[in-house]
Image (spheres, rainbow, N blue to C red):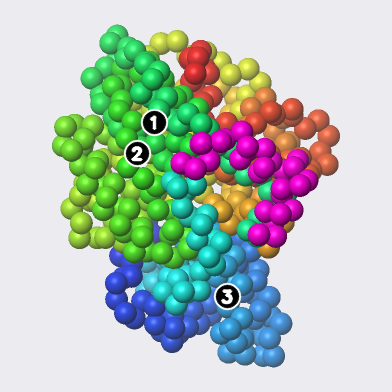
């Protein structure tokens, strides 16, 4: 037996259809096995709040060991996991193929799947996962919705906090009346036939966030690719299911995976690449779906054809070369690498992309922002989320760059809120957090 593994981490398929997957006794047995290994290692103590909660439980127990911790006390440990995957990808020496076979995030997912199967998922929290429904409704009156959800609204936010458990100070995504799919249909873009990569074809998988909350990301990606000769089609069957994954609703995730993979298949067969515009969604298409439905050939094909947007631009630069016209980004960029970009095991593609611009000045921040999807906006989690993300906020503030960027739009706004709370002299005046592809479009001088 080796103390730790030097092999690349691998993941097993998620056996969610096996009755034992949600068996409470078997889950508790596995929790105790894994938690005891974590207790003896403690390498992940500074990643998120799950591990401090676990270690405090053990240290404050009667024996100082796991045997005197009640199973009923495990839930706060599970609840603090944001499924960022950083412990699995960057810290744990005991992940498969090590014989300890430890996958902490997927064990937390299994616990939540059992809760969901027992009907214990909060009804209010289930409404958060219905991103397509929420987006379609909000776009009917986005001004009203954005006014009501703004942190400066001292009338509606306390009501939202009480009714939906959303912290009154947590920044919430804005909604747009004109979605990315609508803008794509009404705002034409010319493909640059002189670009070295001319002839490439790609589908932009809009994602629920880009479609309803920030179409500018999609328009920037479309414009950059057109400048580089890539003919694009915007396709959005539905949300990838990441919000449902966070709640343990694996059947719903599987349904979304089958539906989207079936709609993407004809495009792939015609030679189109698939580009996801948000790292969490790229992670779902590339890695999580094949683990949930390992025998589905359409999903395997989609996984092989999917790229993160930054990854795709870097691939063009390396293979064909970029179109001319890139200019500098004066003042530099503080760039947060999203956890779900790191979990794709592709390297710092957003940093590589931004460094393709002349006179590139990129300060990379590679640590979890603490937001964790919908987790970080909840009343009981918001302050913890800011605490976890404080090192990111401090690095961003101290970098003193003109731009703040994150591959994860939710993380970017969360980091901004963290910066606002810091007492750091000379903090940069950053108006908003941007996606790296938005900055790359700006470097090209593209009007969006």
Of the image marks 1 and 2, the number of the one nearer the N terminus:
1
SS for tag 1?
helix
SS for tag 3?
helix
Mark 2 is surrounded, within 10 Å at the Cα level, by few (under 14), some (14 to 19) or many (20 or more) other residues, namely some
Whether residue 395 can be seen here: no
Q: Based on the picture, tell me whether residue 189 belongs to the magenta stretch.
A: no
* Residue at (18% x, 53% y) in the render: 297
Q: Main secondary structure of the magenta part?
A: helix
Question: In this figure, which residue is indicated by the disc labeled 1?
Answer: 181
Q: Based on the picture, tell me whether residue 141 belongs to the magenta stretch.
A: yes
* Residue at (43% x, 87% y) in the render: 25
Closer to us: 202 or 159 = 159
Q: Position of residue 109 (x, y in %)?
A: 45, 67
Seen in the picture, residue 128 relative to 1 is either above or below; the reply is: above
Question: In this figure, which residue is indicated by the disc labeled 2?
Answer: 236
Residue range highlighted in magenta: 135-163
Q: Position of residue 108 (x, y in %)?
A: 48, 69
Query: Which is more foreground, mark 3 or mark 1?
Result: 1
How many marks can you see?
3
Closer to us: 122 or 350 = 122
* The quadrant where residue 307 appears: top left
**Mark 1 and mark 2 residues within 8 Å of each other at the beta carbon:** yes
Of the image marks 2 and 3, the number of the one nearer the N terminus:
3
Of the image marks 3 and 1, the number of the one nearer the N terminus:
3
Mark 3 is surrounded, within 10 Å at the Cα level, by few (under 14), some (14 to 19) or many (20 or more) other residues, namely some
Q: Is residue 154 left or right of residue 280?
A: right
């Amino acid at each position: 037996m080796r103390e730790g593994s030097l092999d690349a981490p691998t993941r097993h398929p998620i056996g969610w259809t096996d009755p034992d997957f949600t068996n409470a006794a078997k889950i508790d047995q596995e929790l105790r096995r894994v938690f005891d290994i974590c207790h003896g290692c403690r390498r992940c103590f500074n990643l998120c709040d799950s591990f401090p909660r676990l270690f405090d439980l053990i240290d404050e127990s009667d024996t100082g060991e796991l045997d005197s911790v009640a199973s009923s006390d495990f839930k706060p440990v599970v609840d603090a996991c944001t499924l960022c995957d950083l412990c699995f990808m960057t810290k744990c020496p005991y992940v498969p193929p090590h014989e300890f076979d430890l996958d902490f995030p997927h064990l937390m997912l299994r616990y939540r799947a059992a809760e969901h199967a027992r009907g214990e998922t909060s009804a209010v929290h289930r409404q958060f996962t219905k991103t397509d429904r929420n987006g379609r409704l909000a776009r009917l009156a986005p001004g009203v919705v954005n006014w009501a959800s703004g942190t400066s609204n001292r009338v509606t936010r306390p009501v939202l906090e009480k009714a939906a458990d959303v912290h009154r100070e947590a920044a919430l995504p804005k909604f747009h009346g004109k979605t990315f799919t609508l803008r794509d249909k009404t705002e034409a873009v010319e493909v640059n036939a002189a670009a070295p990569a001319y002839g490439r074809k790609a589908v932009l998988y809009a994602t629920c966030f880009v479609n309803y909350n920030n179409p500018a990301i999609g328009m920037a990606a479309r414009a950059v690719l057109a400048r580089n000769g890539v003919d694009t089609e915007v396709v959005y069957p539905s949300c990838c299911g990441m919000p449902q994954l966070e709640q343990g609703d694996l059947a719903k995730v599987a349904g979304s995976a089958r539906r989207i993979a079936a709609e993407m298949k004809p495009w792939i067969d015609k030679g189109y690449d698939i580009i996801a515009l948000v790292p969490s969604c790229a992670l779902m298409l590339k890695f999580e779906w094949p683990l949930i439905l390992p025998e589905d050939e359409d999903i395997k094909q989609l996984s092989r054809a999917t790229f993160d947007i930054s990854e795709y631009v870097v691939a063009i630069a390396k293979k064909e070369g970029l179109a001319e016209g890139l200019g500098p980004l004066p003042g530099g960029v503080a760039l947060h690498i999203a956890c779900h970009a790191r979990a794709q095991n592709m390297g710092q593609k957003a940093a590589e992309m931004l460094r393709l611009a002349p006179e590139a000045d990129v300060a990379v921040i590679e640590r979890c922002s603490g937001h964790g999807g919908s987790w970080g906006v909840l009343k009981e989690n918001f302050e913890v989320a800011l605490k976890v993300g404080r090192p990111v906020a401090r690095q961003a503030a101290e970098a003193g760059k003109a731009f703040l960027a994150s591959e994860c739009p939710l993380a970017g706004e969360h980091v901004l809120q963290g910066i606002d709370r810091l007492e750091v002299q000379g903090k940069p005046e950053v108006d908003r957090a941007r996606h790296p592809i938005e900055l790359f479009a700006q470097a090209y001088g593209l009007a969006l």
